[in-house]
Image: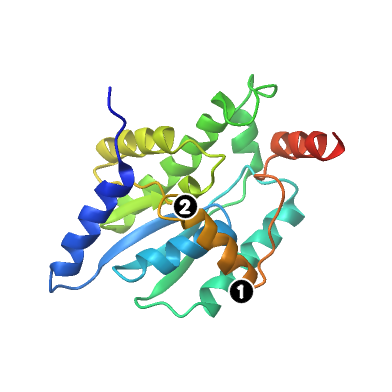
Amino acid sequence: MNQINYQKKLDMLLEKLASELTKPKHLFLHSCCAPCSSYVLEYLSRYMEITVFYYNPNISPQKEYLARVEEQKRLIASMPLKHPVHFLEGSYQPECFYEAVRGHEEDREGGERCFICYELRLREAARLAKEGGYDYFTTTLSISPLKNAVKLNEIGGRLSEEYGVPYLYSDFKKKNGYKRSIELSAEYQLYRQNYCGCVYSKREAALRDSG
């Protein structure tokens, strides 16, 4: 079976939006952190108005969560973006994450536990996108080489059907997106963490660093 080219799907949609002489569409963008969102904002704000939705109950400890929230706000305020970019912080309820991944504590990073976490965050984004009447929703997560873009798009497509809001299919690491995010992180001196966010990814990062 041929793998779907999500970047091509996105390029075709953006080309269509650019040709339409109408008010910009409004994207509800789930963001995992400022560094990952940097390229996505630079890229997509040329075509759309964006609301950045910061919802990451997986992040631990709370001090780390708060540091990442502030970096996200600082980045949005600092970047020169064509269309407006707004910020919305979701609720920080780590117990929701622990309940969702119960029984998967020993999964390796990138496995089923991560897929459950993807859906937890994307589901809340889809729900609020529906509630707020947004034109599209998506996530910055696919920019990371460590994240499964196929699984993210599969979940996003399924939630799109469930909530009735179009999902913006994407693989933001393509077209040197991840490389550009590294450059922008340096340019804006963004705090870059060495683990995804949860206690399990932090444990794996510590093991890698000690090895």
Let me know if residue 166 appears in the view. Answer: no
Q: Please state if 193 lies on the left or on the right of 40 as rendered.
A: right
Camera-side residue: 138 or 5?
A: 5
- The quarter in which the C terminus is drawn is top right
Neighbor class of circle 2 (other Cα within 10 Å; few <14, some 14-19, many 20+) is many
Residue 138 picture location, percent across and down = 38, 50
Going by the numbered disc 1, the residue's amino acid type is Glu
Disc on res. 140: 2
Label 2, secondary structure: give it.
loop
Residue 120 picture location, percent across and down = 49, 37
Q: Quadrant of residue 103?
A: top right
Which residue is drawn at the image coordinates 14% and 68% (left, top)?
19
Residue 168 picture location, percent across and down = 31, 49
Going by the numbered disc 2, the residue's amino acid type is Thr
Looking at the picture, does residue 147 appear above or below residue 7?
A: above
Which residue is drawn at the image coordinates 61% and 66% (left, top)?
185
Asked if the residue under mark 2 is in contact with the one under mark 1, i.e. CB atoms within 8 Å, the reply is no
Disc on res. 59: none
Let me know if residue 76 appears in the view. Answer: yes
Looking at the picture, does residue 6 appear above or below residue 204?
A: below
The earlier-in-sequence mark between 1 and 2 is 2
Which residue is drawn at the image coordinates 67% and 71% (left, top)?
189
Of labels 1 and 2, the one closer to you: 1
Q: Count the numbered circles shown.
A: 2
Camera-side residue: 100 or 193?
A: 193
- Residue located beneath label 1 in the image: 187
Q: Residue furthest right?
A: 210
Residue 93 picture location, percent across and down = 62, 45
